[in-house]
Image (tube, rainbow, N blue to C red):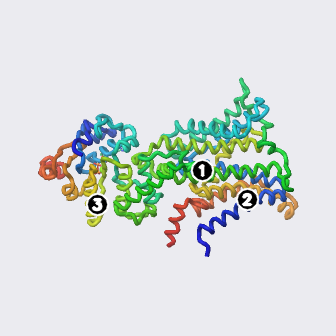
Amino acid sequence: MTGILLEARDIGKRFGGVQALKDVSLTINSGEIYGLIGPNGAGKTTLFNVFTGLYPRDSGEVQFAGKALDLASPHAVAAAGIARTFQNIRLFANMTALENVMVGRHVRTRAGVFGAILRTRAERTEEAAIRRRADELLHYVGIADRADDLARHLSYGDQRRLEIARALATDPQLLALDEPAAGMNATETGALRDLIEGLRRDGLTVLLIEHDVKLVMGLCDRVAVLDYGEKIAEDVPEAVRANPKVIEAYLGTGAA
Amino acid sequence: MMNMAMREKLGLALIAVALVALPFVLASAGTAWVRITNFAVLFVLLSLGLNIVVGFAGLLDLGYVAFYAVGAYVYALLASPHFGLHLPFWVILPLGAAVACLAGVILGAPTLRLRGDYLAIVTLGFGEIVRIFMNNLSAPVNLTNGPKGISRIDSFQIGPVNFAGSDTFAGLVFSGPIKYYYLLMLVLLAVIVVNRRLQDSRIGRAWVAIREDEIAAKASGINTRNIKLLAFAMGASFGGIAGGMFAAIQGFVSPESFVLNESIMVLAMVVLGGMGNIWGVIAGAMLLSFVPELLRYTVEPAQRALFGKLLVDPEVLRMLVFGAALVLTMRFRPAGLWPETRHRREMNENRA
Ligand SMILES: Nc1ncnc2c1ncn2[C@@H]1O[C@H](COP(=O)(O)OP(=O)(O)OP(=O)(O)O)[C@@H](O)[C@H]1O
Ligand SMILES: [Mg+2]
């Protein structure tokens, strides 16, 4: 499980007058936790949205697991093996926690209208497997006791975990987390850290946007820094932390 | 103490017995009541079809009656003297469902990018286009016979039993409407089973996911375009089946039966009963079908008895009751009279 999993080349994205991404290239290796940091508005979320096909890009290509990624359709990206969470949580609010995760299995299952109407043996077997897997994932992220609660009744921290469980349900190779610790208290952040480390142990590659510097520096194998849509650094955490360009980006000109 | 499952079974058995006996009870009050019930069941079928599109997938469709029209005309054209074709109903009904399904895809495909209000306007236009087509496709080739409509449509025939006349069996008189009633009940049962199965399936969950958050649904790997098209197609098929049965029961179709008002009526049934919940939708459709008829039969005699003359036309009252029912529901039970279990569970939680 070594080698390059994702390679992005010269990604560009403009919103009217804002150049949100400018020729961003990066490579993520299989099995690593890759951090993506940068000041507010640097373009981190935009990069996620381009990778997952939610925003059309202006330029650039992405190779994933050795194949060109079809960035025009989000479901194809999910099928290829990239799953994500959202900075401002997007759950299916009026579905139960379990159902949310079951939806994540959609892309790995096949039953159609006729299977459902006739309740074929294949359909029933598949439904049971979906339910079982969803249940396992709720246990995995530690919210199995909330399985039958509506997603919108979960606490903030549990909602973030549920989003991770739903993303994991798509059997991703790369899990992209957009500020998973935002709004969490110290205990919740600690538990999240354990969860992400567990994911790495289980062979998953993680792309992590995070403002919590301690979390990023402690977890990540490598970190890239975006500033005004440009990648200004990419290295191991210690080197990034010492990089004058990075210090300047965070503290402003003249502060370094 | 009986357990829940037993209680439920017993309840269902009682309902079944009541439904089997119902047409004879109604017939004793006049065959008109059996007919009224049959039309109410047709509306239940329509509401259940629209519920897939609006309730499950959250796509506001204001032109649903178009599919009803398509089903009705397919039946009328293939089983009437108009073209001299007299195919059996078990051939035409599935065909009508298929053609309506196709119409659903044709409507769905260009509207997939639209949401909310915009979708409502386009579907409304589609409904009107279909009706206008029916109105005008009488020249140069007389396809639909225009506003005059198509009459003398064949009634259903199963073996020796024709649904137009009466048969006596075991000392009971089975009039045409009573036979249609039983057939409608069978179709309704099938539609309910299909709806419930779809609801707890991979596809049903995908519909609800799209309704809840389309972006998250996409990112979770749902091909939202195809799954929405599927909702339109399934909803339209149900409409097509109901339309075919309508044509046979009525014996006559014309574009007038498929005006925008009918779409709005069906939508009101879905919303009043409780979007997304099958039983709520059935209750809504029954209520909005029966109450106006009850008024029609009670208000006029009551006024004549009280005042000696008719002061308020029952038709006016009908709209009044209709409007009041919707306003009150939206005010006091915004999720409908009998909302989706998810919503109900949540209300119980709040009480606890
Ligand atoms: N949909 C959009 N329409 C217009 N401009 C946008 C849109 N999305 C992002 N932007 C702009 O693109 C730039 C990058 O935004 P982005 O959300 O990617 O930043 P970010 O690095 O995720 O910031 P934060 O840390 O605050 O989440 C910002 O200037 C933002 O205003
Ligand atoms: Mg962001």
Dot 2: what SS?
helix
Q: Could one spot residue B283 in this view of the protein? A: yes
* Residue at image coords 20%, 49%: A223
Report x, y in % for residue B150. 77, 35
* Residue at image coords 69%, 51%: B186
Residue B62 appears in which quarter of the rendering?
top right
Relative to A121, is A54 on the left or the right?
left
**Residue type (three-letter) at the residue carrying disc 3:** Leu
Q: Which residue is mark 3?
A: A192
Q: Residue B19, labelled with which disc?
A: 2
Do the residues bearing badges 2 and 3 touch, measured as CB atoms within 8 Å?
no
* Above or below A29: residue A210: below
Residue mark closest to the camera, 2 vs 3: 2
Dot 3: what SS?
helix
Mark-to-mark CA distance, 1 and 3: 42 Å
Report x, y in % for residue B115. 50, 44
Mark-to-mark CA distance, 2 and 3: 56 Å
* Above or below B191: residue B104: above
Tag 2, which chain? B
